Image: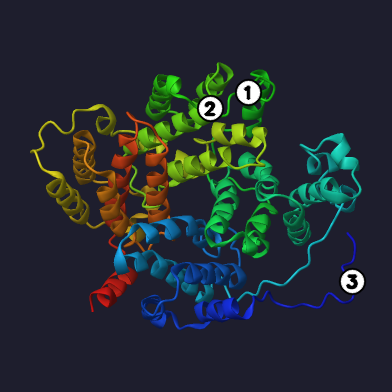
Amino acid sequence: MRDLGEGNVFQPVQFRPDVEARVRWVEETDPAQMVEATYRELRGGTPPTDLLTASTLAVVRSTELPPQHHGGPLHPVCGVHAVHHVAKRLHGETGFLPIIQHVALANNHVHSPQMGPYLMPAIEPLEGSPGEIGSYHISDAELTEGMSEQAQKATRGVGATKGAFHKSLRALAAPAAEHYFLWLLQHLPAGEALDQLLPLAVARNGMDDHNFLFPVYSARALDCIGWEWANVVFRPPVRYQARRGMRLIRNGYDFADVEALVDDLKLLEIDIAERSHPGETEQIGQLGFVMGRNKNYLDNIEPLARALAEGLSLEGAGEALSVGAAAAYISTSYGNPMDSHLHTGTNNRRYLLRTPGVSRRNRILGLLTGFTGPEVLLAERLLNWNENLDGDVTASLPDRDQEQLLDAIVDSIEGQPWLDWRKIGVASTVAPDSVKETVALARQYAERGYDAEAYFERLGEIACRDDFTEMHALKHFQAIVDEYYATREPYRWLHLVSAAKSAAIIHLGKEHSIYEQARSLLAA
């Protein structure tokens, strides 16, 4: 590895003066004052996106990346897309709520002894070549896995720096990887830069869903706050990949089997249409429901791959995955308030399908790994609510107009019994049968053809109440909304119902202290 030079004196990352002032405000405000201070800023006219940018940059610059996926910048960055869009969805000062939640979370993380104090150093972009990277403990064959012979021999320019970045991630050389990635950001379109992170992101999805979610959500955060911040926001996901992959759960899944299936079916060689069309509607539904009803999630890989081999478009496969994800979600009694990953994973995979610069290989492998993440698989053991999907759950419900039914849905959500998540453990939580009542009401709303926008506005406010899950409620809500509008009739009802189930489960813990403080300020 080359020396960066004697002039490379340590300096912390700093921003232009107006942004630096806001970032420091997030970092330095007393957490006990943060909710009210954020409300005063918004009420005084500070643009919400400016505060969201500041809180994002603060949590990236001033928190350490923990050895697991909770704490630090990961979930606050992954939440930016949802916060940005929910804030726009909600009317009046209610739209302040997601911004307040994000700023408060970032401020809390900065002040937490579990994540700070930390200062991200300023670094320079660095051109590189594969020959500069090696390891005493990792073979060169492992470091160059997936690289062409030509790429391995490159000595300068984009190809060589891609190779240096590829090897530095696998050599666990995080600082070098950061230097190289900053250089690539300057020399590649955004989608192609993101694509450099996707091989490991997809390959390690089966170890931890966040290997995939973190880099893709980072790109989507930049879509909201501006790609001018890419050289800071992408550094934590680069570091997240430049470490040993650890399995969160043990199972028989092997990513190499997925790669072999792609090769066997020649999915990278045959002509696969990009765009869907109305003629695929029935096939999308049939495939989606097969996946949604499957009791073994890993068995969903092959039917999706074969559908692509037999002519289903990439968009059609993404939509079938979406139908399957929602069908599976409403069929399980798993009560983890962070059980958002079927929807968020699918939503991000479909984002890649429309992102220029992402390779066909990463798009296809991304789709095929949609049901492989451990956070997704945790719900598989509780697939015992099939009546939510197949049963006539609305037959005994009284007839209500739209407003009456919306009120009944909200009352059902707010009336859920309290569960002590800290005592039970979120991964061991089973949803009570009262959540099925909420699901039935939501199905009735869908069957009546009532207004989805009115429904999502009510449930969007409820998603803003959670301050326990590091943005999972908001992320889940926004992914569901995205998927509802990206899914054709007659299948989009699955997402509408999923939103109600998610809201009811989030309400079980009633962890709403930040929301209650913010609401009191809005009401004053």
Q: Which three-letter amino acid code belongs to the residue tagged 3?
A: Gly
Is label 2 in contact with label 1 (beta carbons under 8 Å)?
A: yes
Secondary structure under badge 3?
Answer: loop
**Which label sits on residue 17?**
none
Above or below: residue 19 compared with residue 154: below
Q: Is residue 206 in view?
A: no
Residue 160 image offset from top left, x and y in percent: 85, 47
Q: Quadrant of residue 381?
A: top left
Q: In the rendering, at what x and y percent does residue 453 appear?
A: 29, 48
**Distance in Å between CA atoms under marks 2 and 1:** 9 Å
Mark with earlier residue (2, 1): 1
Number of other residues with Cα within 10 Å of mark 1, as a class: few under 14, some 14 to 19, many 20 or more? some
Q: Position of residue 161 (x, y in %)?
A: 82, 51
Residue kind at label 2, given as amino acid type: Ile
Between circles 1 and 3, the one closer to the viewer is 3
* Residue annotated with mark 3: 5
Nearer to me, 502 or 157: 157
Mark 1, residue position: 261
Label 2 belongs to which residue?
A: 301
* Residue displayed at 16% across by 53% down: 411
* Horizontal arrangement in the rendering, residue 32 relative to residue 347 (left or right): left
Q: Outermost residue, top direction?
A: 310
Q: Position of residue 16 (x, y in %)?
A: 64, 77
Say if 406 sits above or below 392 in the image: below
Disc 2: CA contacts within 10 A as few (<14), some (14-19) or many (>=20): many
